[in-house]
Structures are given as C-alpha cells and as structure tokens.
Image (cartoon, rainbow, N blue to C red):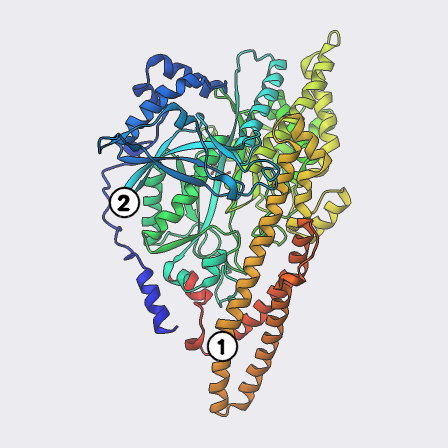
Amino acid sequence: MSPIRQQNVMAAQWSPGASIGLRDLTNSDNQIFGENVFSPAVQRQRLPKDVYKRLSQTLAKGEPLDTTLADAVALAMKEWALEKGATHYSHVFQPLTGLTAEKHDSFYGPTGEGTALASFSGKELIQAEPDASSFPNGGIRATFEARGYTAWDPTSPAFILENPNGALLCIPTAFVSWTGEALDSKIPLLRSMDALSKAAIRALRLFGNDSVARIFTTVGPEQEYFLIDEQYYFERPDLIITGRTLFGAKPPKGQELDDHYFGSIPERVLAFMLELEEECAKLGIPIKTRHNEVAPSQYEIAPIFENSNVGADHQQLTMQLIQNVARRYGLVALLHEKPFAGLNGSGKHNNWSMGTDEGENLMEPGETPGENWQFLFFCTAVIKAVARHAGLLRASVASAGQDHRLGANEAPPAIISIFLGAELQKVFDALEKGRAAKSTPQSFLGLGTPVLPALPMHGGDRNRTSPFAFTGNKFEFRALGANQSLGLPNTVLNTIVAEAVDELSDELEAALAKRGAKLETALASILQQAYSENKAVIFNGDGYSEKWHKEAAKRGLKNLPSTPEALPELISDVSIALFTRYGVLNQRELESRYEVFAEQYVTKLNIESETTAGIARTQILPAAVRYLTELSAAEMGTLAAELRAKIDEFVFAITKLEEANLEENHPKSEDVLDHAVYFRDTVIPAMTDVRTVGDELEKLVADDLWPLPKYSEILFIK
Ligand code: ADP
Ligand code: MG
C-alpha cells in the first residue's frame, strides 16, 4: 500500500481500544436498564395522574390518542429530557430506505431579551414537517405537493440518545404524505397489528374468551453481523461504498473448520459487545444472547421479544448502536447480507408470535397440543396464510443484497415452505386422518425428567434450512436480511394471518350456528380440511437440496430466486385485495413500495457495478501491469506470459462491464422492472466476470503490490 494511503488509514483511527478496561463495572444492567427511556414508569412519576391514566389506556388498548393530552406529555417529556442533558429533540422515522431518518431541532428559542428559553409544545410533540421531498415515495407525492409529516407514535416510548458532546431526545414517529398515505414502514405495521388484533379477538370469542381486549403480535429478531478492523475497512473502497467486498480470492482457510461458531469470543469483540449491550440496556432494549456465528468474524445478537412495533423500532436502534459502538473499538460492523463471497452471509431470524393482553401466547402448544384446539386453530391459520401468500412473504424480504443468500444454497431458499418439527407434524397428521390427535407425552419429555418443562417444546430437531419454522412456541421467519427493517415482513405476516384467522372464524361461526353443534367437532372438520388444502407448503427435509427444488415445483410452490421475480408479488391482485381489505396498505401505497424497492435494487447494483469497474481499472489492473513489468525485466518469460494472458482477459472483462454500465446501453423503458431485469441479466454477470479474473490475479501478483487487504487479513486479524 502506498505510504500516503497508509497515513490516511492511520489518521482515520480512533485510538482503538481506548475505552477497553475503563468501564465502571459496578453499574450493572439492572440499574441502567431503561435509564434513557421515557418509559411508562417515568411517565407515571412525571405526568398528572389523569393524563397518565388516559395515555396508558391508549398504549394498552390501542385506542385513539386524545390530542389534548399532548401538551401535558410534551411538558413532562421536555423537563425529563433537559435533566438528562438533551439540548435538541428529533422526530425519528423510518422512510422506505429501510434506514432511520432524523432531523434535530433545538429546544431553545430566543426570548427577545438576549437570552434563550427551552420550549416544547404538544404541537411540536405530535407533528413535524421534515423537508420530505428527498425521501423515496414511489410516486405517491409526485402528483401532489411534496409534503410529508411525521406524527408522534405514543405506543413506542421516546428516548435519549447520548453522544460524547451532547444528548438528543428522540421521538418515534410515523411518516405520512399530506394526503394520509404511509411513506414509512411503521404505519403499515401498526395497521397490521390492529388487523390481527381484531381478527384474533373475534376468534377467541368463539372459543369462549370474553375478557381479552387486545392481541399484540410479537417479534424477537436474531441479528447477524460481521466485525472487522477498521483499518481494512478504510483500505477497501468496495466496503466503504457498497458495504460488501467486490473482490477477494478465497483464502486457504474459510469457515470449513467450523472453529468459529459458538467459539470463545475474542477479547476486543467481547469488550465491544459488553458496551453495546450497556447502550442497548440504557435504551430499554432487552438484549438476551450473543455468540459467534458460522463465518469467521461473524457474530449474532438477539433481544427478548417485544410487541412488533416496539421490537421493530428497537431493532433499528440496535443496528445503529452496533455500528456506532464498533467504532469505539477500532472496528467496523458490516450489516450487509453478503459482505464476503464464499462465506455465509448475514441474516436476521424473525421470531414471531401473537400474545393476548392477559399474557397468553397463542402459539404455545402446551403439553398436549393434540387436544389444544385453540392452539391448533391459530397454528392452522398460520399454515394457511403462508401457503396462500408465500410469494408475498418472499417479496417482503427481497433486495439486491438478499439475492446472494436466498438464491444460493446457504440461507433459507427462495421457496417459502414451513417446517413443523416432528412432534407437531404428528399432531397434524393425526388431525388430517380424522383421528383424535393424541399427544405422546414421553416424546415431550425426551430426558425422562419432569424438571425440564421446556424440553417438550422442542418437539423435533432444528431445521436450519427451512425459511419458516415452528420453534416451540413461535414461528421463525428466517429469510430476512441482516440489513433489513422488520417493518414490511411483519406487516405481511400479521395481515396474512389476520385474513386466515378470519376465514377460519367464518367457517367456525357458520358451523356453530347449526343446532346442537359442538365446538370441538366443528373445529376438527374445519381444521382437517384447511390443513389438507394447504399442506403442500409443509416440508420437513433439507431445503437446500436439488431434490426439494424439483419436488417444490411439482407441488406448485413458488420459487423466486431474484428480486425482479419477487417484487411483482407485492402488487399482484391477491396482495392488493388482501391489504385493501384490511386497510393496511392501499393500492397506491403498495405500488409505491414496489417501485421504491425496484429502484433501490437498480441503484444499488449500479453503484456496485461502477465501483467494480473503478477498482478493477484503477487499482488491480495497474498492480498487475507493474508486476508484469518486473517479471519481464527479470526475463521471467513463462510467468510473464501467464500473467499477460490473465491481464488481457481482465481488460476484456472490464471493457464489457464498462459497456454494460453505460447509461446509453440501459433499457429505455419507463418500467423500472425492465431496468431491474437488465441489471440482473446483463450487469451482474459482467461484474462477476471481472471479479473472477480479478481474484485470479490476486493469486498471481506480488503481495506487496496488491492494492487491497486480502480476505485472510480482514477475517482473521481480530
Ligand atoms: P431459539 O433457540 O429457538 O432460536 P430463543 O429462545 O433463543 O429460541 O429465541 C430466539 C428469539 O426468539 C429471541 O429473540 C426470543 O426473544 C424470540 N422469541 C421467543 N419467544 C417469542 C415470542 N413468543 N414471540 C416472538 N419472539 C419470541
Ligand atoms: Mg433461532
């Protein structure tokens, strides 16, 4: 590496390790948990009694907010925030980029007497108008004024974000166009939670439950990420610009030894994790587990589940904190779905369930699931929902980064199927045959001891290859990408399950209306039929195998390996009817998402392809030519000829890629999907060709001339 770049790299460092060993360990998580959250507990202390009561009712029951409360809440929130050292407040929202957006406003305004006074009104709490015109909207605002508003979401608590030089009050908000259309991922999620709550309450009433007032969907995401030394990060323009390596030959050692997974965590990384968890704790994010993942330098962090809205907000924050805290340790966190070729990518398992306000988990099978009709009812609804809307679920996790995983044999495949596990499978098999679904208690107590009540839950082995698996008392949607917001996938899940619950309720209601009908008899026949009709989606075998791909095709299951194939599912007639019926997304809101996601796919690939061409021509090619000069000067004829041939191949591949990148060669069509298909079919293969030859050159060119840090350095120096 040239001395100048080396200097730049050194300058960019933040004295790594400075904070290691300096933490006050007496400050345990218990004491700091939620310290920076305007939580219900803080609200109870600081709000007038009646205001608190009315506000908490809003939170508990999902009732409409009485806006007259806002002034009182704003006053209390401001005082609390000022005491915490905040000088500014911000409406944070989640535009369709999948990222979090914020604009900071000062609490302080001039008094006219040369001093400043802190003020924050209910109006400022409830609504703000960010300069919204540059957020993606897929045409929603195009025909109107480019106006967008953020609106306070009282169901997700406000919090203080600390910075070494100040603090900021963050208010979770929804982002809407002035015509009331959702421009973010929070609004549809909230709407879908309402839809499911209504449907599930209706069903529970049929089961004789008259007391439940609200059902919450829950989410517990398992976030995977890579951590690398920032020195290598800054030396790789591909990582800086695209978040993934566009070049890099396979090192002699990859993940073959399986020596990293659940291995002991390196000291610097553990120090980072402890500080990350402390930061999460302050913000009330209940982190539960941490461990090494499969690939070298890959890790995972998972919280205890929360209601979907709060869980999704916390997940956005967690991703932000992972990246911020990493820098304090001279590390950079990579959240890209596929930072390194030849190694596992990073996903985010989305554990999902529904729970009542009385604390009951509707996906809890209990000791005898075969006799638990309520559980079987909701479980059948999930199967039915996933079977019907598998394509939509697939579309909800589609992106350029995801195509490296879902289309390839490492993550759950692009075919959405359900894994029930041996125990539950037995129950459904029995149900289908019309037999009383008897449970087999012994197999629920595998270790033969009653002191392990959790053991029965794991009825069956794990199946890491399944995109949608029942895991004890929840379903795990495993196809999310590491970089993704939880918003859309959970919106889809909640809505499709609401629909299936309603349809089963319709049938149940009709059956019960008949004279002398018994609940269990009615359920047995309704669930039997629903299961039989939808069981094609159930697959307990190896999801990676070629055999399954053939079998799935025979069963008529959708296989959508790439984003351009998946996205149209968002705007299929079936999807539009579903979302419209439940008031979750109207047709324009769906079309806008389709367009935004397709544009993002094109834009990301365009950036990748130009970066590939740039690195190839200005970094790798010059290094190869320099080495060729040395070989020729040393009269190393054979080696020089070999290298020259590779260089010629490289130049040819670069030229082809540069041609594909030319604006004038892009499709002229107005339809963004045509552009997406062009990038998938023409640009990606051209990029792959350049990379293939580039990686071969890495193995030929002298190491001291090679301009990029190699995989073995990046992944193994910790
Ligand atoms: P597993 O080992 O099967 O992955 P864990 O107990 O480690 O299960 O949980 C993984 C994730 O699932 C955690 O984030 C956890 O909070 C979440 N989870 C557990 N129960 C639920 C639930 N009822 N709803 C949503 N997520 C849940
Ligand atoms: Mg899991």
- Residue 406 in percent (x, y) is at 61, 50
The residue under the point 60% across, 33% down is: 493
| Structural distance between the alpha carbons of marks 1 and 2 | 43 Å
Q: Is residue 307 visible?
A: no
Q: Are marks 1 and 2 in contact (CB under 8 Å)?
A: no
Quadrant, the N terminus:
bottom left
Is residue 543 positioned above or below 42 on the image? below
Would you say 553 lies left or right of 338 here? right
Q: Residues within 10 Å of mark 1 (few under 14, many from 20)?
A: some
- Residue 579 in percent (x, y) is at 65, 30
Is residue 165 positioned above or below 700 on the image? above
- Residue 508 in percent (x, y) is at 70, 17
Of residue 155 and residue 513, the one placed in the foreground of this image is 155
- Ligand 2 is within 8 Å of the C-beta of the residue at disc 1: no
Q: Is residue 151 visible?
A: yes
Q: The residue tagged with tag 1: helix, strand or loop?
A: helix
Q: How many marks?
A: 2
Would you say 541 lies left or right of 282 here? right
Q: Quadrant of residue 385?
A: top right
- Residue 410 in percent (x, y) is at 58, 53
Quadrant, the C terminus:
bottom left
Q: Of marks 1 and 2, which one's residue comes earlier in the chain?
A: 2
Can you tell which mark lies on residue 164?
2
Disc 2 residue type? Pro
Q: The residue tagged with tag 2: helix, strand or loop?
A: loop
Residue pointed to by mark 1:
622
The residue under the point 25% across, 54% down is: 18
Disc 1 residue type? Pro
Give the residue furthest to the top: 515
Give the residue furthest to the right: 554
The residue under the point 54% across, 86% down is: 640
